[in-house]
Image (spheres, rainbow, N blue to C red):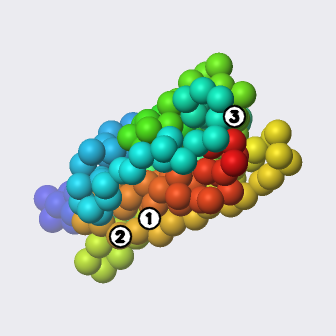
Amino acid sequence: MKKVCNRCLSFWFVAALLLSLTGCTMHVTKHISDKLDMEAINRNYGIKPIDLSSGSKCAGAPAVKIVNMEMRTDDYPAFKNPPYEGFINPKEMMNSVSSYLKDGFEKNRIKADDQSTKVLQLKMIDLQSVAGVWSFGGTFKMELQIPEKNIAKTYEATENAGNGFSAAAYAIHGACRKVIDDPVVQEYILCK
C-alpha cells in the first residue's frame, strides 16, 4: 500500500513539475484590438484633437487613404507574461492599427477615404508587450510609406500599463499619434 501511495505522489509531483515548466500560449490580436478605443485613450492622455483641415491648400476637403501592406499571417510572438505567451496575426493587427489611424485622422478633421489620391501605406515592424515587476511595458514599431513622394519613415512608441493588452494598445496609439503630428505627413495630406 505504501509503495502505491509513493508512486501516486511521485506521479503528481512529476505532473505538477511538468505543468509549471510548460507555458500556455494564446492568440491576443483581438484582446489588443479591443483596447484601441480612441475616445478612452485620448481622454487618458489628455489629447484634444485639432482641426488640421483649416490649414489645407487642397482644392477639396483633405482626405487620406490608409493601406495595410502587412502580408504576414503567421503567429508572431508579441506578449510575454511567464508562463503565458501570446501571439498576434500581424496582418489582422495592422488592420486594427489602420482603422485606429483612420479614426485619428477623422478626429483631426482629415477624412479617411479609400478613393483619396493621398496614400499612406503601413507595415508592422514589431509589437511587444512584456510583464514587468509592477506593470507591463509595450513597444510598437511600424513603417509608413508615401509612394507618391518616395518617402519611408519609421514610427515607434513605448508605453506602460497595468495589463499587457493596454500596454500594447497605448504603444500603438503613441506611434499613430506621431504619424498624425508629423509635419511631413501633414504637408503631404494638406497639399502644402
Residue in the image at 15% along x and 65% along y: 2
Foreground of the two, 63 or 87: 63
Residue 103 is drawn in which quadrant? top left
Amino acid, disc 1:
Gly
Residue 117 is drawn in which quadrant? top right
Say which residue label 1 marks: 138
Amino acid, disc 2:
Asn
Q: Position of residue 72 (x, y in %)?
A: 68, 38
> Local crowd at mark 1 within 10 Å, few (<14), some, or many (≥20)?
many
Amino acid, disc 3:
Lys
Q: Position of residue 104 (x, y in %)?
A: 44, 43
Residue 135 is drawn in which quadrant? bottom left
The answer to whether residue 162 is seen in the rendering is yes
Residue in the image at 58% along x and 42% along y: 56
Q: Is residue 134 above or below residue 191?
A: below
Q: Quick one: label 2 or label 1, which is nearer the N terminus?
A: 1
Q: Position of residue 109 (x, y in %)?
A: 44, 38
Say which residue label 2 marks: 160
Q: Disc 2 to disc 1, how far (Cα)?
A: 6 Å
Residue in the image at 50% along x and 31% along y: 111
